Image: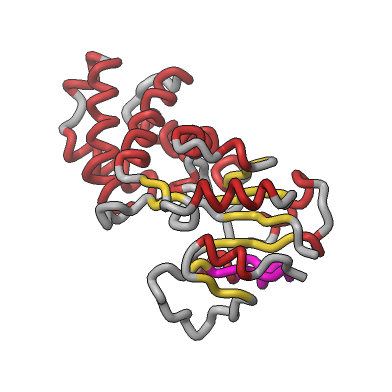
């Protein structure tokens, strides 16, 4: 029986798109201006270096062109560009700007906690692998999970920003199984996006597609083993063989 339920996070358990914002425009128009203000507060000389528009354009270029690097490494490149000493405290201040923007528009789907509680009561093992926006560090996303009081339901949580790989790379699920110390035959992946279905297919495990918006899959996407309209649909599937 499949008794290890591994979840995606964004738009599966938590909705990060309450106002239908796009990550690219939000980063350039909201996050980076906040970071500019943070640098001005912490480095007086920075006030004379550049305008907020210049900083946002340069920062966005550095972040978007270095996709293989973690967010911390990309922020370090921005500081290097402006010849600002790379200090852990300063990086954390900048990461906080990113965190505040992430959580600002986030909300928990109404059924999330009820479903996680019931799955846990049934003795199922719950884990999580999530790609993080711009490869931001996992502790930021874990803080969001703590904020919404759902971290406690998971045996472990893993994030792409901490490991340098992202879905649909099947190596992501290798890491999941090593962390869980479980057999592949026990695992099923639950997510809302085509990348979740592709990753499960690449890894050779079944997937459950949470299709809240009744979308159509693209032609190059594998067919998920199960489709549900919201998380409560999981109870129609248990047990899963």
Coordinates of residue 98 in the picture (x, y in percent): 36, 36
The residue positioned 71% from the left and 52% from the top of the image is: 122
The residue positioned 42% from the left and 52% from the top of the image is: 109
Question: Is there any visible trace of residue 86 in the rendered image?
Answer: yes
| Extent of the magenta region | 198-209
Total residue callouts: 0
Q: Is residue 36 above or below residue 182?
A: above
Identify the image quadrant of the C terminus. bottom right
Q: How is the image coloured?
A: secondary structure
Say if the magenta span includes residue 205: yes
Which quarter of the figure has residue 171?
bottom right
In this rendering, position of residue 181 left or right of residue 191: right
The residue positioned 69% from the left and 70% from the top of the image is: 206
Question: Is there any visible trace of residue 137 in the rendered image?
Answer: no
In this rendering, position of residue 137 left or right of residue 189: left
The residue positioned 38% from the left and 71% from the top of the image is: 213
Coordinates of residue 153 in the picture (x, y in percent): 62, 41
Which residue is more in the foreground, 99 or 136?
A: 99
In this rendering, position of residue 143 left or right of residue 180: left
Q: Is residue 179 above or below residue 223?
A: above
Coordinates of residue 24 in the picture (x, y in percent): 31, 53
Residue farthest bottom in this picture: 219
Coordinates of residue 54 in the picture (x, y in percent): 20, 39
Q: Is residue 236 above or below residue 48?
A: below
Which residue is more in the foreground, 49 or 241?
A: 241
Say if the magenta span includes residue 89: no
Identify the image quadrant of the N terminus. bottom right
């Amino acid at each position: 029986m499949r008794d290890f339920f591994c979840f995606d996070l964004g738009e599966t358990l938590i909705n990060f798109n309450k106002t239908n914002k796009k990550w690219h425009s939000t980063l350039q128009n909201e996050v980076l201006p906040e970071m500019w203000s943070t640098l001005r507060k912490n480095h007086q000389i920075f006030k004379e270096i550049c305008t907020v528009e210049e900083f946002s354009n340069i920062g966005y270029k550095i972040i978007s062109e270095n996709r293989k690097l973690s967010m911390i490494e990309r922020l370090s490149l921005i500081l290097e560009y402006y010849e600002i000493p790379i200090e852990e405290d300063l990086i954390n201040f900048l990461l906080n700007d990113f965190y505040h923007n992430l959580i600002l528009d986030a909300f928990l789907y109404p059924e999330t906690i009820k479903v996680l509680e019931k799955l846990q009561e049934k003795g199922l093992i719950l884990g999580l692998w999530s790609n993080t926006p711009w490869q931001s560090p996992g502790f930021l996303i874990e803080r969001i999970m703590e904020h919404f009081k759902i971290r406690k339901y998971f045996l472990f949580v893993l994030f792409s920003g901490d490991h340098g790989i992202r879905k649909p790379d099947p190596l992501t699920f290798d890491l999941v199984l090593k962390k869980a110390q479980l057999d592949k035959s026990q695992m099923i992946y639950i997510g809302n996006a085509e990348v979740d279905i592709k990753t499960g297919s690449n890894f050779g495990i079944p997937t459950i597609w949470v299709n809240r918006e009744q979308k159509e899959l693209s032609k190059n996407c594998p067919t998920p083993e199960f489709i549900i309209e919201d998380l409560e649909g999981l109870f129609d599937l248990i047990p899963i063989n």
